[in-house]
Image (cartoon, grey):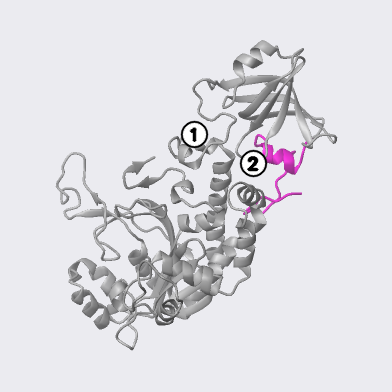
Amino acid sequence: MPKHPGLSEPWNLRTSTLRPTIADLYANPPLNQPLTISGWIRTRRSTKAVSFAEITDGSTLRSLQVVLPHDKIPRDRIETDLHTGASLTVTGQLIPTPDRPQPFELQAESYTLHGHANPNTYPLQKKAHSLEFLREISHLRVRTRTFQAVFRIRHGVSIAIHQFFHERGFIYVHTPILTPSDCEGAGQLFQVITTEDSDPHAFFGRPAYLTVSGQLEAEILAMGLGRVYTFGPTFRAEPSHTPRHLAEFWMIEPEMAFFDLNDTMDLAEDLLKNLIRYLLRHHTEELTFLTERYDPDLLARLESTKESAFLRISYTEAIDILQKSGREFTYPPIWGTDLQAEHERYLVETYAQRPVIVYNYPRDIKAFYMRQNDDGKTVASFDVLFPGIGEIIGGSQREERLDRLESEMQRRGMNLAAYQAYLDTRRFGTVPHSGFGLGLERFLLFATGLTNVRDVIPFFRAAGQMA
């Protein structure tokens, strides 16, 4: 009997009190029995004696063929009611069809129409639509198989993330969306004000912002819970129009007491491989569809990645590799400057031909909280680089030494008074600790083969756009 991912007991259509879905029918078909099923019409055609409607309900990419005999349901009623996009509930009997492409079909006795869809105005008709067009109607694009596949994969990845951390003894914590400070020190924040008063001090008595990361609060919680992770929305006020940036996106951020840099790189690699394995086990239908429709190398790339040992090189080694590559880069690779997307993709796709972890970046291009290395020039940080994506995870060992942390914050001109709670974790029982952030949408680009982050989040918010 089939087992739904994440459920402890097998799903049994015959004993369930829930109304069956089309996925349930394919898993455990109640053949030659009365059945009621609901969904939306994908296509409908009529002959002299019968009409055929292909319906879908979002539970699977597969549809159910419904046969509507005209001697039971008048053709003129069917052709008035049942157009692409209309919703209905059908009652009938599931009949096996061994001589046809589908294993069964529903012989309808009756139907109830829930919602019309005018064929002259409903924008999703039989022809294929571009992803660009579908972004313009994001409220309807979930009716397509593409976005049903993408959002089912997004759900699967989310389930797998929680399972991964739960099985390893992590505590799921909820960090604030409203914050008084900038985690990164970059200043690209959305400020929060009330509609009644435009004074940013009015409500809280101090300026408030939408969070760019839950890291600082997660670090605080790790100092008592040991291993924690947060998984929620974050916000960046970057005026970027690239297909890799959103103003609102989701981040997975674990923080671990007593972990050093190597422990954390191991955890990051293990997490990414675990998520890929989960998708290959539980979402073959969706991955196969996306491979056939959008990226012919998708399945092979996922299989290869889950088996690869990620290459680990220092930032200094990476710069040396790039400088000796003979490649003409738009941005010359110079020690002390950040790696650009073209550099990251060369390292992954040409040099290593597998994921790469670059560690020990220059101190001046990384955040204030990263642990300073003994060379005085670099910090114990790392980025995980993926083919086609570039950076997918960024993390570090955190600076646990109070004097070093305060000195770095002062060097950067930061207001230490705003970070007293954070600094207290170094005053009272400080420990070595580490963490990282995984951008969910970046990972989903890799997992789906799509190329624009606006296509892997249900409702996108980006500079100049709010779907």
Q: Position of residue 396 (x, y in %)?
A: 39, 74
Please say whether residue 268 is visible from this viewpoint.
no
What element does badge 1 sit on?
loop
- Main secondary-structure element of the magenta-colored stretch: loop
Front residue (pair 427, 261): 261
Q: Which range of residues does the magenta coloring cover?
A: 1-30
User: Hey, what amino acid is under mark 2?
Assistant: Leu
User: What distance separates the C-alpha of mark 2 from that of mark 1?
Assistant: 16 Å
Q: Position of residue 122 (x, y in %)?
A: 51, 25
**Residue under the image location 44 percent in, 80 percent down:** 324
Image quarter of residue 339? bottom left
Q: Can residue 24 be found in the magenta stretch?
A: yes
Q: Position of residue 237 (x, y in %)?
A: 29, 53
Q: Is residue 423 above or below residue 377?
A: above
Q: Which residue is mark 1?
A: 140
Please say whether residue 202 is visible from this viewpoint.
yes
Image quarter of residue 226? bottom left
Q: Is residue 138 above or below residue 404?
A: above
What element does badge 2 sit on?
loop
Kindly identify which numbered label has been placed on residue 61: 2
Q: How packed is label 2: few (under 14 Cα within 10 Å), some, or many (20 or more)?
A: some
User: Hey, what amino acid is under mark 1?
Assistant: Leu
**Residue under the image location 34 percent in, 64 percent down:** 217
Number of callouts in the render? 2
Q: Of all residues shown, which one is farthest toward the right?
A: 99
